[in-house]
Image (cartoon, rainbow, N blue to C red):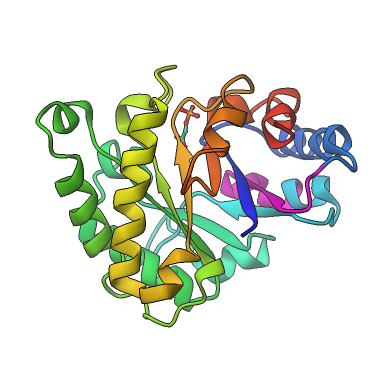
Amino acid sequence: MMKLFAANWKMHKTQAEARQTAEELVRLVGSGLAADREVLLTAPFTALAATAQGLAGAARFSVGAQNFYPETHGAFTGEISPAMLQDAGASWALTGHSERRHVLGESDGFVGRKTAFGLAAGLNVIFCVGEKIEERKANQLAEVLTRQISLGLADVPRDVSPQRLCVAYEPVWAIGTGLVAGPAEILEAHALVRSQLAAIFGSAGREVRILYGGSVKPDNAAEIIALDNVDGVLVGGASLKADDFSRIVLA
Ligand code: PGA
């Protein structure tokens, strides 16, 4: 299975900055990208085309968006469709990121609608899940992941190509905090996600990549990526500088 190293630039970078970071990343990674690895940069809408220009078609590097609206077109002021993202160079998009859930108020149902719609529209999707600290303390990890995954994937066709869907486990308490989940916590959560994917998709559920996200840095990436059921990482803060992110990609 190809491991996916995904950057989430969030609300950072102008067009010029995005182009420069993408160019620098390709230069730093050079010919060192392992044969079983691919890289994705999820950029702000305004910087998608510039990010694609910066990558200049480098093999196994692609561009993604961080959000979209689940309609093809229409009276949805301020929103953007999957086709518009593809037109700007994106082949992937995130759904269910904790900042969309907890800052922007997206429900499990809306996240599910977006996930199914994005896949049907031809985007590859990284669907994100994860528990809040109070849910972890109340021993609700399994309950939260089961709810988020069953509602989030409810309308995804059972025969979806497993390469087009990833699930990112991102404990909310580890995002942007410097508090990385420990190996035992990652193993437990990823095993729960894997068993639910198998229950939903059967044997194809073993081919859906499960990414870890939450304070991944150059010095912890190698240990995390080597864990069972960790098929990639989703990186926020440490993806903003090409130097840091290249060290994660090459870890
Ligand atoms: P972080 O963010 O790497 O800055 O913790 C991860 C994410 O939000 O996807």
**Left or right relative to 152: residue 57:** right
Residue furthest to the left = 138
Q: Is residue 116 in view from this perspective?
A: yes
Give the residue drawn at x 66%, y 50%.
48
**Left or right relative to 153: residue 213:** right
Q: Is residue 45 magenta?
A: yes
Percent of width and height locating residue 242: 74, 29
In the foreground, 31 or 156: 31
**Left or right relative to 204: residue 86:** right
Looking at the image, is 61 positioned above or below residue 203? above
Q: Is residue 200 magenta?
A: no
Give the extent of the magenta segment.
Answer: 33-50
In the foreground, 149 or 142: 142
Q: Quadrant of the N terminus?
A: bottom right
- Quarter location, residue 233: top right
Percent of width and height locating residue 178: 44, 17
Percent of width and height locating residue 244: 69, 23
Give the residue drawn at x 23%, y 63%.
150
Looking at the image, is 165 positioned above or below residue 61? below
Percent of width and height locating residue 98: 33, 40
Q: Quadrant of the C terminus?
A: top right
Q: Is residue 70 in view from this perspective?
A: no
In the foreground, 124 or 117: 124
Give the residue drawn at x 43%, y 48%.
168
Count of numbered marks: 0
